[in-house]
Amino acid sequence: MKSNRVNYDEISPEYDRRYSATLPNRGKALIELVSRHRAKRILEVGCGTGYWLAALHSVAPHLYGLDLSTGMLTQAQKRDASLRLVHGVATQLPFDRGWFDFVFCVDAIHHFGEPRDFIAEAFRILRPEGIFAIVGSDPRCDRWYVYDYFEGVYATDWARFPSCGTLVEWVSAEGFNRAESKNVEHIQDFHYGRNVLDDPFLRKNSCSQLALLSNNAYQTGIAKIETALRNAESRGATLIFRTELFIHMLVGYKPAS
C-alpha cells in the first residue's frame, strides 16, 4: 500500500543527506539564469530545506521560499536565517501581483495538486518580463533501478510527473513567451553488487518515490534487491544497478505588457 502524500515534516531532519558536497549542475544553471537576467527578488515554490535558494545567495539579495511543510521550513531557516520563508500552498501564492523578478521550483511540481493553477499563480506574481522556471525530471526519459524492484513506483511517477512537452504547453497556455525546456544535468550512476545498499537514494525517506511506500512495500522492494544479489553471487556474478536521469529546466518569460 502507498500513502497519498509524503509527510515532509517527518522526514525533514534527514532530507539533505541526499545531496552531495558539490552543487549539482541544475543549481549552476539556476545561478547562470539569475545572473544573466539580474533578477533581484526571487521566490522558490516548494523550497523544502532551502538548498537551492541558498545556492542563489551569492547572486540575488532578496530570497523568498514557500513550502507546505513547516518541518522543511524549519530546516531552511536553520540553513540560512536571511531567507524570507512562508508557509503556504503552491496553487494560492500569498503574494501581490507583479512582486517577483523570478519564480521557480525544483523537483516539486508533481506535489502541487493542480500544476496549471501554480503556473497561473506564478504568472500573476511575476513582474512584466519576469522569468519562470520549472526544474525536474521526466520518468519517461529516465532509467532508474528503483523502478525495477519497487512495485508500482514507475506507474505512480508516470501518473504524477507531467512530461516535458506537457509542461511547455501549459506554460505557454498561461501566457508565458518563449517557453522552452532543455536538459541541464545528466546523472549517470552505477552501483556494483552490495554497494547499492549504501546508495543514499535507497533510504526510505530520501525521495518521494520511496517515502510514499508503506513500510511493508518498501521492505518488499529491499528484499527483492537482496534476493537478486544472492542469486548473482551464487553464480559468481556482480549485479549492476543503473541510474540514468535527465534533469530538465523549462524557462518562460512574462510579456512586457
Image (cartoon, rainbow, N blue to C red):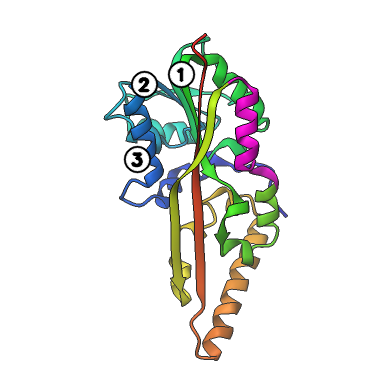
Mark 3 = which residue?
28
Residue found at the very far bottom of the displayed protein? 235
Q: Depth check: 62 or 220 in front?
A: 62
Q: Residues within 10 Å of mark 1 (few under 14, many from 20)?
A: many
* Most common SS among magenta residues: helix
The percent position of residue 18, horizontal first and vertical second, equals 43, 51
Q: Earlier in the sequence, mark 3 or mark 1?
A: 3
Secondary element type, mark 1: strand
Measured Cα–Cα span from mark 3 to mark 1? 20 Å
Q: What's the residue at 47%, 69% (across, down)?
A: 196
Q: Earlier in the sequence, mark 3 or mark 2?
A: 3
Q: Amino acid at mark 3?
A: Lys
Q: Quadrant of residue 215?
A: bottom right
Q: Earlier in the sequence, mark 2 or mark 1?
A: 2
Mark 2 = which residue?
39
Q: Amino acid at mark 1?
A: Gly
Asked if residue 163 lies left or right of residue 79, the reply is right
Asked if residue 9 lies left or right of residue 74, the reply is right
Mark 1 = which residue?
130
Measured Cα–Cα span from mark 3 to mark 2? 15 Å
Does residue 251 show up?
yes
Q: Is residue 200 magenta?
A: no
Q: Is residue 215 above or below residue 222?
A: above
Q: What's the residue at 63%, 52% (across, down)?
A: 140
Q: Amino acid at mark 2?
A: Ala
The percent position of residue 88, horizontal first and vertical second, equals 56, 23
The percent position of residue 2, horizontal first and vertical second, equals 70, 51
Q: Depth check: 189 or 194 in front?
A: 189
First to last magenta residue range: 159-175
